[in-house]
Amino acid sequence: MGVNLKNLLRWQNLKIHVSPALHSREKEGPATPEHRHEDFLELVFVRSGQAIHVVGDREAPIATGHIFLIREQCEHYYRNAQSLNIYNILLDRGFLAYFKDDLQSLPNYQLLFNLERDDEKAVLMLDDRHFPDAVKLLENIIAEEANDTPGARTIVLGDVLRLFVFLFRHARPVLADSGGNSGHAYKISRLLAALDQRCQEDWSLEKMAAMTRMSVMNFRLEFKRLTGLPPINYLLKTRLTKAALMLMLPGKNISEVALACGFQDSNYFTRQFRAEYGMTPREFRLQP
């Protein structure tokens, strides 16, 4: 069974929807029908209870405080649900694109949205100290979504963004230090956040590997597996993205932008920028 986001939205021009769901154990079969999300991501926050989350032929236990992402076209269901009370945060992939430049400096954002692969599901955990604040935000979003008064959409947008930042700041990865692929993903997510914040620094392959406490060979393989790019190529793309954002603003000339983004040679910067964006930095800055 496929589900489309358009049919669930309260406002068609705000591509996000939050809804609670309660699942209980059944004698036979899955606790929920197997289904897939045709065109949206689903961030799940477990308010209470426990269950087994089944994705394809993979199973993972989930419990109170767990947070995980379900991608588009991903078929899944819950079984052995014991009073499983969850919040489903449904969003269009482009929703966070407007805020990506700020959010990707948070390792947990990288872990959930940039590193997760179909063969490995990252799970975060929110502890008791921060749990009530997250529930309060979610309940307020649900109440405002049901509200038809002016200003409701604006409140929902603000609370959703506050919720994401809150979760990315305060949750911790489950089993992040247990070794294996899960530990590698968390270590590399921290590196990606550092590259985003300090792309102007001199990042060698050895320096990157040292930050993740992995051998250079293992780091190179894991990095490409999790991001789809070799480390140096990823760094170059990060620098060019930062440069493009800076070129949209006044205050620095092109040579200063290049240096601020880690390019010591402005000619090299121009060549790489043209290869990425199909125009020179000067042409990019002058476009309407």
Image (cartoon, rainbow, N blue to C red):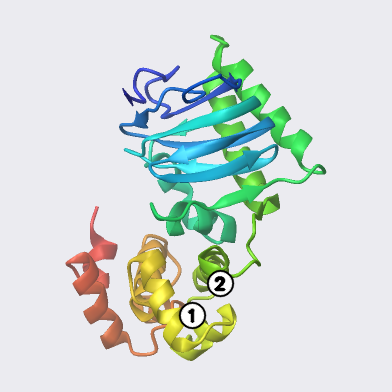
| Residue 183: mark | none
Residue at the extreme right of the image, as rendered? 129
User: Which callout, 1 or 2, points at the residue further toward the start of the chain?
Assistant: 2
Report the quarter where the N terminus lies: top left
Viewer-closest of 139 and 98 = 139
Query: Which residue is painted at 50% across and 69% down in the image?
Result: 192
Q: CA distance from mark 1 to mark 2?
A: 11 Å
Residue 141: where, in percent of width, then height?
61, 24
- In screen coordinates, is 268 left or right of 242? left
Mark 1 Cα shell of 10 Å, populated few (<14), some (14-19), many (≥20): some
Relative to 25, residue 176 above or below: below
Whether pointer 1 and pointer 2 mark residues with C-beta atoms closer than 8 Å, the reply is: no
Give the quarter of the image for residue 130.
Answer: top right
Which amino acid type is shown beneath numbered disc 2? Ala
Give the class, few, some or many, for how many residues have Cα within 10 Å of label 2's Cα (few <14, many ≥20): some
| Tag nearer the camera, 1 or 2 | 2
Quarter holding residue 193:
bottom right
Give the x, y percent position of residue 70. 45, 40
Q: Which residue is mark 2?
A: 194
Residue 161, given in percent of the width and then of the height, sits at: 57, 39
Question: Can I make out residue 150 in this image?
Answer: yes
- Position above or below: 76 against 29: below
The picture quadrant where one finds residue 275 is bottom left
Look at 32% across and 33% down and name the residue there: 39
Q: Secondary structure at mark 1?
A: loop
- Residue to which mark 1 is pinned: 200
Residue at far top of view: 148
The x and y percentages for residue 202 are 49, 88
Q: Secondary structure at mark 2?
A: helix
Q: List the single residue furthest toward the left.
A: 278
